[in-house]
């Protein structure tokens, strides 16, 4: 009988340890791959903007020249790790209300998801419905909009390298590739069978938000020219002939990749565009709060293919080797000067 009691005690202790470890993995976050020495763009007030930007997190950016406002992604919902893994997700209406108010926006010319995963396109139809915006993207994004009940008059399909004009903005979508997850199983679930062929009606699994087509955006404006790379993927030679002075560079998961992949990514984005100013995006948590300081990935998601702590060191090495490069970060929600 004594050994049975001891075994029961050992099992109880192990269960408690597993529970504590699981709680820690779900509720703590890896370090954000951002160096404290990296400077922020100046806020409006310290300089008058010809063109400004507000940043929510991931790749949600509000771009404005005072006449035309448009948004990339428009994603504000933050479903948790367990819901992503085992449940179903849908746009969180209160989060969207909060996010639009925090960005001080009630009307948009367009909302443009960089691709059709949930953390880019899930909220976009509701954002378009509330702001009168066009929803512009791939056929997969269009079916996300249709499933949400967005009218066809507010849905427009991208054509590769065919510019869309919004006021003084000329936005050219360039078909690219999503970040290649190192884990084969996760890569197949997230990137295999990429099309959404029917209207998608949430709540659905996170993996029902298929990738569709991943785009890089090349944006010209009288104030300046910039490129947005929403995911750390690339197609060799895709940016040839598309020069820019600024690049919004997706960093999510880059540190989990091989050194060769990181070098290729840098060459096909920063070097290929000729950008001298780098603004990192998509390096913060997909499950953290929608307000407050940015956090790194939840520990449980880092275990499945996160940063591995190498992104920041990689970027700093590039900056040290290229003194003409400038890196600037974005605060959350505050309007900052992109071009004065």
Image: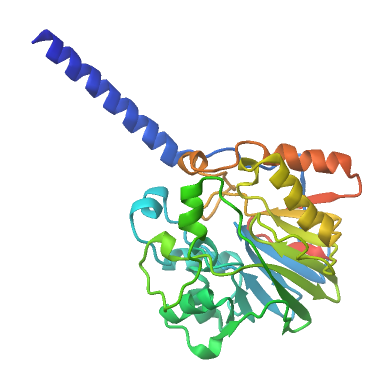
Can you name the residue that lies furthest to the right here? 324
Residue 114 is drawn in which quadrant?
bottom right
Q: Is residue 149 left or right of residue 170?
A: left
Of 284 and 217, the residue lying toward us: 217
| Residue drawn where x is 76% and y is 51% of the image | 266
Residue 301's spot in the image, x, y percent? 48, 44
Residue 287 in sight = no
Q: Is residue 325 left or right of residue 253?
A: right
Could you tell me which quadrant the N terminus lies in? Answer: top left
Q: Count all numbered tags in the image, as a single digit.
A: 0
| Residue drawn where x is 42% and y is 34% of the image | 24
Q: Is residue 279 left or right of residue 92?
A: right
Residue 326 position (above or below residue 91): above
Residue 134 position (above or below residue 320): below
Can you name the residue that lies furthest to the bottom here? 153
Residue 68 position (above or below residue 27): below
Can you name the residue that lies furthest to the left here? 1
Residue 279's spot in the image, x, y percent? 75, 55
Residue 47 position (above or below residue 82): below
| Residue drawn where x is 37% and y is 49% of the image | 82
Residue 104's spot in the image, x, y percent? 61, 70
Of 142 and 72, the residue lying toward us: 142
Of 189 and 270, the residue lying toward us: 189
Q: Is residue 186 left or right of residue 72?
A: left
Residue 113's spot in the image, x, y percent? 59, 70
């Amino acid at each position: 009988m004594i050994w049975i009691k001891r075994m029961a005690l050992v099992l109880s202790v192990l269960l408690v340890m597993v529970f504590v470890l699981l709680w820690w993995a779900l509720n703590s976050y890896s370090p954000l791959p951002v160096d404290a020495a990296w400077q922020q763009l100046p806020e409006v007030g310290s300089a008058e903007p010809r063109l400004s930007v507000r940043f929510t997190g991931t790749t949600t950016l509000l771009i404005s020249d005072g006449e035309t406002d448009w948004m990339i992604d428009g994603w504000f919902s933050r479903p948790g790790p367990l819901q992503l893994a085992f449940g179903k997700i849908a746009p969180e209406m209160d989060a969207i209300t909060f996010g639009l108010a925090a960005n001080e926006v009630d009307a948009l010319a367009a909302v443009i998801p960089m691709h059709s995963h949930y953390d880019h396109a899930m909220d976009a139809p509701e954002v378009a419905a509330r702001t009168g915006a066009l929803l512009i993207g791939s056929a997969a994004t269009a079916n996300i909009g249709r499933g949400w009940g967005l009218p066809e008059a507010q849905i427009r399909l991208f054509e590769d390298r065919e510019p869309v004009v919004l006021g003084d903005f000329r936005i050219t979508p360039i078909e690219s590739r999503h970040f290649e997850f190192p884990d084969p199983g996760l890569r197949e679930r997230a990137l295999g069978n990429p099309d959404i062929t029917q209207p998608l009606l949430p709540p659905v699994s996170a993996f029902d938000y298929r990738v569709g087509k991943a785009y890089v955006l090349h944006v010209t404006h009288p104030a300046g020219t910039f490129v947005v790379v929403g995911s750390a993927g690339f197609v060799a030679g895709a940016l040839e002939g598309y020069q820019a002075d600024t690049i919004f560079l997706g960093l999510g998961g880059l540190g989990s990749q091989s050194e060769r992949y990181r070098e290729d990514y840098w060459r096909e984005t920063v070097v290929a565009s000729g950008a001298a100013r780098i603004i990192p995006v998509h390096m913060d948590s997909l499950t953290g709060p929608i307000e407050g300081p940015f956090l790194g990935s939840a520990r449980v998601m880092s275990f499945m293919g996160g940063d591995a702590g190498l992104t920041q060191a990689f970027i700093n090495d590039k900056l040290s080797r290229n003194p003409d490069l400038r890196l600037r970060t974005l605060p959350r929600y505050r309007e900052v000067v992109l071009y004065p």
